[in-house]
Amino acid sequence: MNVLILGSGGREHALAHAVSKSKLLTSLCVIPGNPGIEDIAKCIDIDPLDNNLIKEFCAKEDIDLIIPGSEAFLENGIADTFTNTKVKVFGPTKQATLIESSKEYAKDLMKKYSIPTAKYKVFKDYHLAKDYVTEQGVPIVIKYDGLAAGKGVVVCTSFDEAYQTLENMLVDKTFGNNAVVIEECLEGPEFSFMTFVHNGIVIPMPLAQDHKRLLDNDLGPNTGGMGIYSRVPIIKEDVIEKSYNEIMVKTVNALIKENNSFTGFLYGGLMLTNNGPKVIEFNARFGDPETEVLLPNLETDILEIIFNLFNGIKTEVSWNRKFYIGVVLASKGYPTDYDKGYVIEGLNQLKDNVYHMGTKRIDGNIVTNGGRVLLVLGNGITLEQAQKDAYNNVNKIKCSNLIYRTDIGNNSLKG
Ligand code: AMP
Ligand code: GLY
């Protein structure tokens, strides 16, 4: 099988690593890839958002399967581009991507099919939205219904903050002209539930738990994720089963009933509340950094899973029982302003235990080239051992401009 992965981050590095081990693989290309991926695949520097170029590339290289990394490719219609061609795309159509790209679509779908989620209402009018907040009270969650560079969700703890947020989103239109979804504020531990999906078949993966805040003890601003671990001992088997049946499978079936069948990685961002697991959000793609700690645990051939799905077969997937922890090394100043171009040393001591998130090769050196720069992995038969291994590996990286959290995994170790 000739495979093409689209993207350039740690998620795509981990995907490329898993695909590169497949017995079904003939050739692996990544557009555009990164310096870490160059060691295991052919990286091609063309625009991954130019579907015509991708089409030409696939014809020339006889590509059989495309695995898109980020939602940007899905929203840009990569799956639609190859409908009814011999190239399979393991990702949803633009319409099925609405489960991630439109909060209103996702919430309405959940309401219609009784999939557990926070109570909500959608508003375009500032005054009506403000009245609703006044009536509901705080804390309350306000979400802009569109792309907002990670700043579109505000958990408001005071009326002042809530009114100010509504003013920013609906009067000043900081992110654009879309509506806001106002949601009941849920409480409980969050976890990521990832699945492989095609034609109503839903294959679950182990759970992972992200650490969104910049600093130790969940302080500081929200980020794209500063660390992650998988498995999640505080979430027990009965909750996993309930989440699988009453959320993931139910959602996949709901999309089929809506004539909007989903193919690809369906990701549930879930919260375990006192009333059971509920949906915080869905993503239409593999999580980042979830992928980096899940795929090293996968014992079954990833291409076999995907190939079988396209043939209507649900593979018995096996995962090893190890714990994995990923610590993100980010540029000083992230998530706001940061400098790039700092030389990173020690990478060759880590082999498969590091994924490149934002790096660049300059004059034979690997240098920092993004907010989140590297994800360093550790594993072990206990979470504690995995944590020790991860930080031992982090210490092998030398760079004068990288910061990281020192408590990834602690919440489960304490719990
Ligand atoms: P989202 O982008 O929708 O995943 O939201 C980002 C973060 O905001 C989530 O990871 C949660 O920590 C928090 N959040 C979102 N919705 C809610 C909610 N209804 N109740 C409590 N926290 C929420
Ligand atoms: N880990 C969060 C995300 O992939 O959106």
Image (cartoon, grey):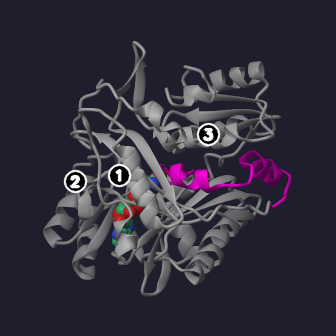
Q: Residue at x 70, y 25 (%)?
A: 55
Which tag is nearer the camera, tag 1 or tag 3?
3
Secondary structure found at label 1? loop
Q: Is residue 384 left or right of residue 45?
A: left
Q: Residue at x 61, y 39 (%)?
A: 17
Taking the image as drawn, is residue 123 in sight?
A: no
Taking the image as drawn, is residue 286 in sight?
A: yes
The spot of residue 410 in percent (x, y) is 34, 67
Looking at the rendered structure, the kind of residue marked 1 is Met
Secondary structure found at label 2? helix
Quadrant of the rendering where the N terminus is positioned: top right
Q: Which mark is residue 226?
A: 1
Some atom of ligand 1 lies within 8 Å of the CB belonging to the residue at label 2 = no
Quadrant of the rendering where the C terminus is positioned: bottom left
Crowding around mark 2 (Cα neighbors within 10 Å: few <14, some 14 to 19, many 20+) is some
In this rendering, is residue 235 above or below 16?
Answer: below
Determine which residue is flagged by label 2.
Answer: 168
Quadrant of res 138: bottom left
Looking at the rendered structure, the kind of residue marked 2 is Asn
Determine which residue is flagged by label 3.
Answer: 17
The spot of residue 185 in percent (x, y) is 33, 75
Quadrant of res 141: bottom left
Q: Residue furthest left?
A: 160
- In this picture, which residue range is highlighted in magenta? 285-314
Crowding around mark 1 (Cα neighbors within 10 Å: few <14, some 14 to 19, many 20+) is many
Q: Is residue 121 left or right of residue 102?
A: left
On the rendering, which quadrant does ligand 1 occupy?
bottom left
Dot 3 or dot 2: first in sequence order is: 3
Dot 1 or dot 2: first in sequence order is: 2
Dot 1 or dot 3: first in sequence order is: 3
